[in-house]
Amino acid sequence: MQDHLFLAEHYEPDLSVEQLQERCGRLRATAASAAQELAVRLVGSTVLPTEHCALYLFDAESAERVREVYRRSGLEPGRLTPAVSFDGEQPDLVNERRTR
């Protein structure tokens, strides 16, 4: 179980699947460029086309760091919620980065 997961949800009824994918790409690029400085990583993303919804899972030390990634990407975080993973195979990515 990880202690530093955050799920960002976006309901975007006016956006096409392509627009949701573009936003996902922008968010992923911003998170990657800020990974060292902010100790944040976009673990995964899922677009639900029929629901006009996108979900993003972040590994970060705080919600504030996730919000900073959003700020830098020019996007609003929508709903941002602490998350828990019960997949025991996942490493603690935040602590792993600290030891590099």
Image (cartoon, helix red, strand yellow):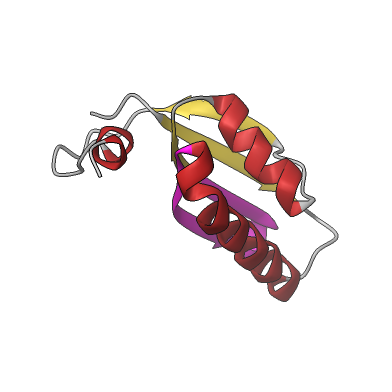
Q: Is residue 99 above or below residue 49?
A: above
Labels in figure, total: 0
Report the residue at 39% width, 28% height from top.
Answer: 4
Query: In the image, residue 51 lies at what x, y percent?
Result: 66, 56
Give the residue at x 61% y 26%: 64
Describe residue 18's horizontal placement relative to residue 56 as left or right: right
Q: Is residue 85 left or right of residue 49?
A: left
Counting from the top left corner in percent of width and height, residue 69 is at: 64, 44
Vertical relation: 2 (above or below) 38: above
Viewport quadrant of the C terminus:
top left
| Residue, far right | 14
Point out residue 74 in the picture as x, y percentages from the top left corner.
Answer: 79, 51
Residue interval drawn in magenta = 39-56
Prevailing secondary structure class for the magenta stretch in the rendered image: strand
Q: Percent position (x, y) of residue 29? A: 59, 63
Q: In percent of the image, x 70 and y 58: which residue is there?
A: 52
In the image, is residue 31 above or below residue 78? below
Residue drawn where x is 45% and y is 38% of the image: 39
Which image quadrant: the N terminus?
top left
Q: Of 52 and 5, which appears nearest the observer? A: 5
- Pick the front one: 69 or 23: 69
Residue 42 magenta-highlighted: yes
